[in-house]
Amino acid sequence: MSASVRLVRALPFVAALASCVAGGAAAQDGPGLTGAAAEAPMLIDRVVAVVDEEAILQSELEREIAIWRLERGQAGDTLAMDDATVRQEVLDRLVESKLMIAAAKQAEIQVEDAEVEQDVEENISQLVRHFGSQEGLERELARNGMNLADYRARTAAQVRDRRYMAAVVTRYVRSKVEVREDEVEAYWNAHADEIPAAPDSVRLASILVAAEPSEAARLEVQRKVGAVLQELGEGKPFPEVARRQTEGPNAERGGAMGVVRRGELFDRRLEDAVWSLRPGEVSRPILTGRGVHLVRLDAVEGEGRVISQIFFPLEIGAAEVQAARERAQDAWGRLQGGEPFAKVAAEVSADPAAAQGGDMGILPLDGLSDRFREALAGKQAGQFTEPVQTPAGFYLLLVKERLPGRRPTFAEVRDMVRRALESERVEAELARYVAGLRGRFYVDIRG
């Protein structure tokens, strides 16, 4: 069974672009030839297979081979395969996809235009973010002989085909798959050793004493922010201003940061600002331990938010670092004197979690920095560290609980095991279904 039959999935957006770009470039070959070159016979394309009266062209096969290699490379698959094997693998994938589409059409399965259009627009939005702007995407398409309308039409055809295949899997494959509870437990017993143990973890609370920038540094950043706000107020596009003004690493992409979800931003003030915006809105200046941020909400994607930012770091000098060190030592002295950790955190800490006693939740030890792991070595529940210097400032860490690593119980992973078993059975049933389609529809492989 070839790779496509294992489960129907959408191609990565870059791969989809590669497919369309290759098609656009191919369409440019030939025009403008004169004389003997124009009269000589040329092999523009050829049919390599026919499925239910629909041809698979050599150019289509070559594009799919390029996408196949890209997918394997992105997945880190270094398995060496000769060109003939790859070609056969991809041709099988194309034939099987065409068979499933033929079955969907024969069953009069409908794909709604609105759903196709939504998927196409999401795909284009991803490409716009990848290239920094719609203008950047259109330049890339133009270099390959295409425009946005061409790309939208080709992507719509691909999306429609994928939805046909997904509908076939739902109607004729998944409906035949049943997983009983006793089978789930038996599967767990056979594969329990394959599930990795949870790492040693620790529940922590923290006090962060941040180094404060000098007044001169604050005034300089304030001046830069004012200039940006003036440009935005004049109606200049956010990506254009970001490319010229931001001092963050995303300047070349117009400040684009991609999709973020709850809990992924380093500062709760940033997160609160992002989730309060509507698409297209720009936040007020947000001060964090790293600097000043102006954040724009570009789009909403389910639970995620697509954002861009203009950022100015606040430089911290040696005098400011020494002042923070002294404040951290003072906080440590208060803890040694018996003051409650939560009380000191609420009064001293610059971390947004200070109001909750500095609680950081449960963290895997192997996910902490070397400096934190070294400071926590030997500390038991109820004990706290001396001040630990980090780029954000000085941390004092309280060990609230140590959780030794262990393998999960069946009850904890029952749903995951069920999905794994169901996936295996869907794969097997899909292979049988596609084999049956070969007997129902005309297939001619011409090599």
Image (cartoon, rainbow, N blue to C red):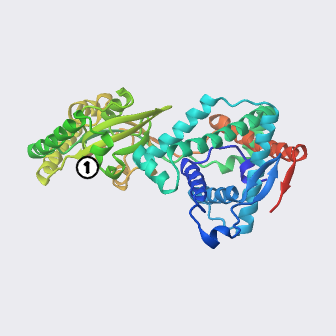
Viewer-proximal residue among 387 and 336: 387
* Residue that numbered label 1 is attached to: 244
Query: In what quadrant of the picture does the C terminus appear?
Result: bottom right
Q: Is 444 situated above or below 79?
A: above
Image coordinates for residue 5, horizontal then vertical, percent = 75, 48
Q: Is residue 128 visible?
A: yes
**Position above or below: 369 against 299:** below
Dot 1 surroundings within 10 Å: few (below 14), some, or many (20 or more)?
A: some
Place residue 10 in its image quadrant: top right
For residue 56, side relative to residue 250 (left or right) = right
Residue in the picture at 56% in, 33% down: 118
Q: Answer left or right for 5 relative to 218.
A: right
Q: Amino acid at mark 1?
A: Arg
Q: Residue furthest right?
A: 439
Percent across and percent down for residue 158 are 64, 43
Q: Position of residue 111 (x, y in %)?
A: 69, 31
The residue at the point 60 percent across, 58 percent down is: 26
Residue at disc 1, secondary structure = helix
